[in-house]
C-alpha cells in the first residue's frame, strides 16, 4: 500500500497505520477467512477515513475563524472536496453491504460460519504458540477467552440485517 510519508519497509512488515491481523508462524498459511477479513478491514478503514475527513472539513472551519477565512478564499474547492469525501464514504460502505460485491459482509459472515473451528480456544492457543508463546503461556492466554458459537453468529447476523 502506498501512502504519503510511508517509509520503505522491509519485506513482510506492515506500516504502523495498517494493523497486522494475524501473525504467521512456520508452516502456517493464510486462510480464506483471514484473506476476507483483511479485505473487509481495508474497506471499513477506507470508509472511516473518508467519513472522518469529511467531519473535519465540516467542523474545523466552524471552530477556527482563521481556517474559515482561508477556506472561503477557495470555497468551491473545499465544498467540492468535503462533499466528495462524504460521497466516497458511502461508496466504500456500499462495497461492504452491496449484495453484488464479491467481497461483502455476507461473504465474510459465511466464511466465518464455515471456519468457526478457527475461533476455538484450541485454535487460538495454536496460533499463539506459532507466534512465539510457550504452550503454558498460550494456555494461560486463552483461559478466559470467549469461544465464538453459532448462536453468536446468528445474533450478529440479526444486527447486520437491522
Image (tube, rainbow, N blue to C red):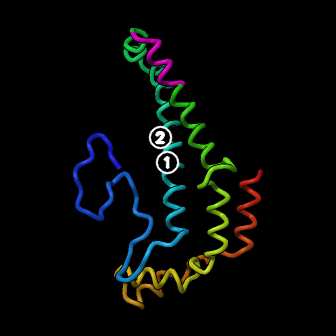
Q: What element carries label 1?
A: helix
The image shows a total of numbered marks equal to 2
- Residue at image point 63% right, 50% down: 101
- Pick whichever, 58 or 119, lies toward us: 119
Q: Residues within 10 Å of mark 1 (few under 14, many from 20)?
A: some
Q: Which residue sits furthest bottom?
A: 136
The residue under the point 32% across, 43% down is 3
Residue 81 forms part of the magenta stretch: yes
Q: Residue 113 carries which label?
A: none
Instruction: Sort mark 2 into few (<14), some (14-19) or many (20+) by Cα contacts within 10 Å.
Output: some
Q: Is residue 69 above or below residue 16?
A: above
Residue 11 image point, x, y percent: 26, 63
Q: Are marks 1 and 2 in contact (CB under 8 Å)?
A: yes
Quarter location, residue 68: top left
Q: Does the stretch in magenta take in 28?
A: no
Disc 2: which residue: 49
> How far, Cα to Cα, is label 1 from label 2?
6 Å
Task: Please indicate whether residue 151 sits to the left or right of residue 30 in the image.
Answer: right
Task: Please state if 81 lies on the left or on the right of 158 as rendered.
Answer: left
* 14 or 71: nearer the viewer: 14
Q: Which residue position holds label 1?
A: 45
> Which secondary structure, mark 2?
helix
Q: Which of 147 and 144 is in front in this view?
A: 147
Residue 100 shown left or right of residue 39 in the figure: right
Magenta segment? 74-83
Asked where in the image residue 66 lies, by quadrant, the reply is top left
Instruction: Give the percent coordinates (x, y) of residue 140.
Output: 47, 85
Residue at image coords 73%, 61%: 157
Q: Please, what is the dominant secondary structure of the magenta stretch?
A: helix
Q: Position of residue 1 (x, y in %)?
A: 35, 50
Amino acid at each position: 500500500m502506498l501512502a504519503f510519508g510511508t517509509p520503505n519497509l522491509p519485506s513482510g512488515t506492515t506500516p504502523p497505520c495498517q494493523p497486522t491481523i494475524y501473525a504467521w508462524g512456520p508452516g502456517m498459511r493464510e486462510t480464506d477467512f483471514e484473506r476476507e477479513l483483511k479485505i473487509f478491514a481495508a474497506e471499513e478503514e477506507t470508509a472511516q477515513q473518508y467519513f472522518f475527513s469529511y467531519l473535519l472539513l465540516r467542523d474545523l472551519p466552524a471552530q477556527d475563524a482563521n481556517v474559515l477565512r482561508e477556506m472561503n478564499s477557495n470555497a468551491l474547492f473545499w465544498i467540492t472536496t468535503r462533499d466528495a469525501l462524504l460521497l466516497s464514504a458511502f461508496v466504500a460502505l456500499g462495497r461492504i453491504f452491496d449484495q453484488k460485491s464479491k467481497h461483502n459482509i455476507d461473504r465474510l459472515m459465511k466464511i466465518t460460519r464455515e471456519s468457526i473451528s478457527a475461533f476455538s480456544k484450541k485454535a487460538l492457543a495454536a496460533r499463539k504458540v506459532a507466534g512465539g508463546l510457550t504452550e503454558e503461556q498460550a494456555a494461560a492466554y486463552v483461559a478466559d477467552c470467549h469461544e465464538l458459537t453459532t448462536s453468536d453468529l446468528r445474533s450478529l447476523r440479526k444486527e447486520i440485517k437491522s
